[in-house]
Image (cartoon, rainbow, N blue to C red):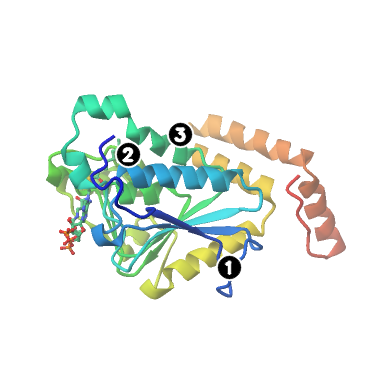
Amino acid sequence: MTDVAAGERQPSIQVAFPAPGGATSTVDGVALVTLDRPKVLNALDFTLIAELTDALEGLDRDPTCRAIVITGAGERAFAAGADIRELAVQTPATLLADDEFHRWERIKRIRTPLIAAVRGFALGGGCELAMTCDLLIAGEGAQFGQPEIRLGVMPGAGGTQRLTRAIGKARAMELVLTGRTMGAPEAEAHGLVTRVVPDGEVVAAALELAATIAAMPPLAVIAAKEAVNRAEELGLGAGLEFERRSFYLLFATEDQREGMSAFSDKRKPTWKGR
Ligand code: CO8
């Protein structure tokens, strides 16, 4: 591993549990994870990616954490991509031997819903990280793109695949082959983002969405997230089969009985996550 700043840096990730009122609490089940290298627009070096995956896996194991918001420190960027200074010294042998990017696969395996709260640039690996999340709240000034072509390479952490699935081949091809960035309104129009909000409200809007999801029955949330994500990978027949089996399985949960009883009783359900 090549860490240009080893030994002289603070943690690259901050984890907090903000309650809607701003106090620190785990009661609403939402964690806020901040990519914290604002001086380099939160560039994703190997240390940051390692800290991020470790933090996400830790939160995923915590039954009190029901939704995770990922954002970037400062106002200028979610993340402006992989750390180019670190990438510049890599060779096929170092990339293969260290395989630092295998961690992206671990992010995909997180079962807790992930919400990207994007302010400013989400470029290269930053756009890929945002697209790995399940929902994406963007500020009006957010900029998305895969500019790797301008560095003599190409996307390597899902850009060619996830962007194409999200916005279609014709648009993805243009962005990937020219490196052009796409503003938040365009990204919303083409289905890349869930919602665009004023820049100053991005994290609050993402936390609110996360709190809504955190209040849902946890096992149904996990199953539904998995089924929606399978739509990107399976053909329609296999996807429908997967969905139906997941639906049947949820009838083994106490939350299914509670949800349907509460509806009949005209009361608010109390979820147990069982
Ligand atoms: N890496 C390292 N440093 C960066 C990065 C980056 N990606 N982006 C910005 N910085 C640094 C700048 O070097 C600068 O530092 P300094 O003050 O020390 O010179 C600081 O952040 C501020 O940036 P700028 O001065 O450049 O700010 P501007 O407002 O002029 O420009 C831009 C903002 C347009 C975002 C510009 O910084 C830029 O083009 N950045 C690079 C964007 C880019 O090319 N991203 C793709 C990187 S490659 C990648 O992500 C590949 C992922 C591969 C995953 C593979 C898995 C297998």
105 or 264, which lies in front?
A: 105
Which one is in front in this view, the residue at disc 3 or the one at disc 2? 2
Which label's residue is closer to the chain start, 3 or 1? 1
Residue ranking furthest to the front: 7
- Residue placed at 81% from the left, 52% from the top? 258
Camera-side mark, 2 or 1: 1
Residue at the image position 59 percent from the left and 68 percent from the top: 19
Q: Which residue is mark 1?
A: 24
Q: Which mark is residue 138?
A: none
From the top left corner, tell me how far across and down residue 96 is, in percent. Answer: 28, 25
- Hey, what amino acid is under mark 1? Thr
Q: Is residue 260 left or right of residue 236?
A: right
**x 44%, y 59%: residue:** 194
Q: Given the image, on which type of amino acid does mark 3 rest?
A: Glu
Q: How many labels sit on residues?
A: 3
Query: Cα distance, mark 3 to mark 1?
Result: 38 Å
Q: Quadrant of residue 198?
A: bottom left
Measured as percent of width and height from the top left, residue 119 is found at 34, 65
Amino acid on which disc 2 is placed: Ala
Residue 157 marker: 2
Which secondary structure lies at badge 3? loop
* Label 2 residue near ligand 1, CB within 8 Å: yes
The image shows residue 34 at horizontal and vertical percentages of 42, 58
CA gap, disc 2 to disc 1? 33 Å
Crowd tier of the residue under label 1, counting other residues whose Cα lies within 10 Å: few below 14, some 14–19, many 20 or above: few
State the separation of the CA atoms marked 3 and 2.
Answer: 16 Å
Query: Which type of secondary structure does the marked residue at label 2 adopt?
Result: loop
Residue for badge 3: 233
